[in-house]
Image: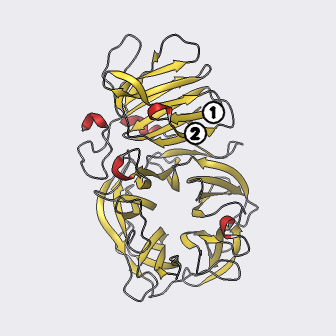
């Protein structure tokens, strides 16, 4: 349901699909810590495989730092592998060191493989193939030149690369942009002015380009200050780009798009954890979350919905009125809204007591609360919602409003409870039926395992 390698965390990642239908994820990996060290935290790519985008099997390390003296000697960051000829090409971020003020020096390199499973990489030369051009992009202190993503050009037989960069014409606090470069052969690149520079974003990380069925383009970009991601669309790669706003709420980051086994498009993203697996811990790099359906082209803004492929991991419904069933720590439940409602998911003891985790909605406002009603996360919906779908997996909570992914949060407090809905004006709580979530690896017991809750302590 979620994935991280044993003992490590997952940060930015890339997805591949082999000819036999096997999926592979390449991901940045590092220890669980709030203190991020640019030169030591992420020095290799982990690799895992899956047949269904839910149950991932770790396969070890697939790529690492370059030799001393090279542009990627200190760290390797976000990558984009894709099919090329009989094998694959991969563009990736290399870090050579730090500026005097401690800012990482970034460039983009290239590697090839004769395989299609995400292994067997060999570097193209010893230096980068694309670097920031100071005419348009900040270099040195507060630079950005990372997270490359490459697609075929829709105006030539060549290639287009987008890169997370810093627009040199703007104040650094709002300079986050998507840089543009073009190439005829993948090895020689021409850098151009920004493809997209919103002017109100600090960092626009992990840009993703997806060609839609009608020939138009979708661009996804992760927003540093909100820790979520937004969507833009355009009729052609060069634009004009239309901004649609938030697609993934705070806590959902670094999205990637891939065809699911049934051929539909899905988005996977990362989700954080908290240091020490407690509510008092700082948010830190985390895990790969389960897929969401990507819906486009129906006349409305792009959106993420519940992916039906997850239904195979759900058990039979429990908790109907008059039915006595044990609390379920990992579950999905649906709630119909009629006025303000709050759904209690965990309580202070196995027998009940104060709510320790709840999800509430009054139509347009959607929120999650922890112990003593502490507001964990909230969002304002564009339209009043009629239904909620709530998912809990360990400490992780997702909420879908009228089927659309709208909120995610973390909570480490309380005992699993029988879900109840408290409606404004109602005398008594109403039981909420739930479907238990079957975990792919319930026996795992390491820093990456799903938090079992206090019932497992």
Look at mark 1 in the image and give the residue it sits on. Answer: 365
Are discs 1 and 2 less than 8 Å apart at CB?
Answer: yes
Give the colouring mode of the picture.
secondary structure
Q: Position of residue 153 (x, y in %)?
A: 64, 70
Q: Is residue 131 left or right of residue 317?
A: right
- Relative depth, front residue between 336 and 414: 414
Q: Secondary structure at mark 1?
A: strand
Give the side of residue 193 with respect to residue 256, left or right: right
Q: Position of residue 365 (x, y in %)?
A: 63, 33
Kind of element beneath mark 2? strand
- In this image, 158 relative to 299: left or right? left
Residue 16 relative to residue 56: left or right: right
Label of residue 378 in the image: 2
Query: Relative to 382, is 321 above or below?
Result: above
Calculate the distance from the C-alpha at mark 1 to the C-alpha at mark 2. 7 Å
Instruction: Examine the rendered structure and indicate whether residue 171 appears above or below residue 364.
Output: below
Image quarter hosting the N terminus: top left
Residue 375 position in % (x across, y down): 53, 37
Residue 200 at x, y = what percent? 70, 60
- Evaluate whether residue 55 shows in this view: no
Q: Nearer the viewer, residue 197 or 358?
A: 358
Above or below, 64 relative to 229: below
Residue 197 in view: yes
Of mark 1 and mark 2, the one earlier in the sequence is: 1
Q: Which residue is painted at 38% across and 22% down in the image?
A: 353
On-image quarter of the C terminus: top left
Q: Residue furthest right?
A: 240
For residue 31, the mark is none
């Amino acid at each position: 349901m979620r994935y991280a390698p044993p003992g490590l965390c997952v940060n930015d990642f890339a997805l591949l699909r082999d000819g036999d239908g096997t999926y592979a994820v390449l991901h940045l990996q590092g220890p669980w810590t709030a203190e991020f060290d640019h030169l030591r935290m992420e020095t290799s790519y982990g690799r895992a495989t899956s047949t269904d985008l839910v149950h991932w099997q770790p396969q070890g390390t697939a790529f690492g730092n370059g030799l001393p003296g090279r542009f990627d000697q200190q760290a390797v960051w976000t990558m984009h592998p894709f099919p090329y000829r009989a094998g694959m090409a991969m563009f990736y971020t290399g870090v050579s060191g730090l500026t005097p003020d401690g800012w990482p020096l970034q460039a983009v390199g290239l590697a090839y493989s004769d395989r299609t499973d995400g292994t067997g990489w060999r570097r193209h030369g010893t230096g980068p193939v694309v670097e920031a051009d100071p005419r348009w992009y900040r270099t040195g202190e507060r630079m950005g030149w990372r997270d490359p993503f490459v697609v075929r050009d829709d105006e030539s037989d060549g290639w287009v690369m987008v890169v997370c960069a810093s627009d040199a014409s703007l104040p650094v606090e709002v300079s986050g942009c998507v840089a543009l470069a073009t190439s005829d052969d993948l090895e020689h690149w021409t850098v151009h002015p920004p493809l997209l520079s919103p002017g109100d974003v600090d960092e626009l990380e992990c840009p993703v380009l997806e060609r839609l069925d009608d020939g138009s383009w979708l661009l996804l970009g992760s927003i540093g200050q909100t820790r979520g991601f937004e969507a833009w669309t355009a009729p052609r790669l060069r634009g004009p780009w239309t901004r649609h706003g938030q697609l993934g709420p705070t806590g959902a980051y670094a999205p990637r798009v891939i065809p699911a086994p049934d051929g539909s498009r899905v988005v996977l993203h990362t989700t954080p954890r908290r240091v020490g697996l407690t509510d008092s811990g700082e948010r830190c790099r985390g895990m790969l979350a389960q897929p969401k359906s990507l819906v486009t082209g129906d006349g409305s803004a792009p959106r993420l919905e519940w992916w039906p492929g997850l239904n195979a991991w759900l058990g039979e419904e429990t908790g109907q009125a008059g039915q006595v069933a044990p609390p379920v720590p990992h579950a999905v439940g649906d709630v119909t809204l009629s006025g303000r409602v709050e759904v209690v998911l965990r309580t202070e003891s196995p027998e009940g007591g104060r709510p320790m985790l709840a999800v509430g909605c009054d139509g347009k406002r959607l929120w999650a609360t922890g112990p003593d009603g502490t507001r964990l996360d909230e969002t304002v919906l564009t339209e009043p919602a009629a239904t909620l779908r709530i998912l809990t997996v360990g400490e992780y909570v997702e909420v879908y409003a009228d089927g659309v992914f709208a909120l995610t949060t973390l909570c480490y407090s309380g005992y699993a409870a029988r879900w109840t809905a408290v409606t404004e004006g109602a005398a008594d709580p109403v039981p909420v039926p739930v479907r238990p979530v079957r975990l792919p690896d319930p026996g795992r017991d390491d820093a990456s395992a799903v938090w079992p809750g206090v019932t497992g302590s």
